[in-house]
């Protein structure tokens, strides 16, 4: 990260504030980019644009969905296991292999610089 920043790359504060692992404790992933294409072409403004992570676990593979997916578990994770052990397997292991153990990151960038470009070529 230091090498990126030393060479002019920028990481929005909103990305820095959102850990990217499912437990939301570690910053494994980042989005870094050049802040300016040219002097008057700024691609991101902390005041005007947003960034973050998308917590898919609030809508996909939720705790309430356990019974929907239970039939897909390998027997070694359900036979002779308590309901607590099965739920723990589902919440911590199974869904990470089905989706991911990282949260997708997103950022809103300005991409239309046509007016600035046209002024520059006049």
Image: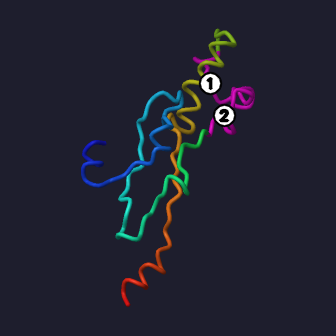
Q: Earlier in the sequence, mark 2 or mark 1?
A: 2
Q: Is residue 27 left or right of residue 69?
A: left
The C terminus sits in image quarter: bottom left
Q: Calculate the distance from the C-alpha at mark 2 to the C-alpha at mark 1.
A: 8 Å
SS type, badge 2: loop
Q: Is residue 3 left or right of residue 19?
A: left
- 53 vs 62: above or below: below
Q: Badge 2 local density, few (<14 within 10 Å), some, or many (20+)?
A: some
Q: Is residue 115 magenta?
A: no
- 8 vs 62: above or below: below
- 16 vs 85: above or below: below
Q: Is residue 69 left or right of residue 116?
A: right
Residue nearest the viewer, comparing 13 with 91: 13
The N terminus sits in image quarter: top left
Residue for point 58% across, 43% down? 54
Main secondary structure of the magenta stretch: helix
Q: Which residue is mark 2?
A: 61
Residue nearest the viewer, comparing 97 with 63: 63
Q: Which residue is mark 1?
A: 90
Residue 95, image x and y in percent? 59, 32
Residue 59, image x and y in percent? 69, 39
Q: Write the start and end of the magenta stretch as one range.
A: 56-78
Residue for point 57% across, 37% down? 98
Residue nearest the viewer, comparing 28 with 66: 28
Asked if disc 2 and disc 1 are in contact, CB closer than 8 Å, the reply is yes
């Amino acid at each position: 990260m230091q090498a990126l920043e030393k060479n002019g790359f920028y990481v929005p504060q909103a990305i820095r504030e959102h850990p990217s692992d499912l437990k939301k404790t570690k910053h494994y992933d980042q989005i870094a980019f050049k802040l300016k294409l040219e002097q008057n072409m700024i691609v991101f403004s902390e005041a005007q644009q947003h960034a973050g992570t998308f917590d898919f676990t609030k809508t996909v593979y939720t705790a309430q969905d356990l019974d929907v997916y239970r039939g897909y578990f390998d027997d070694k994770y359900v036979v002779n296991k308590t309901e607590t052990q099965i739920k723990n397997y589902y919440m911590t292991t199974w869904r990470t292999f089905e989706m991911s153990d990282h949260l997708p990151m997103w950022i809103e960038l300005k991409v239309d610089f046509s007016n600035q470009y046209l002024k520059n070529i006049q």
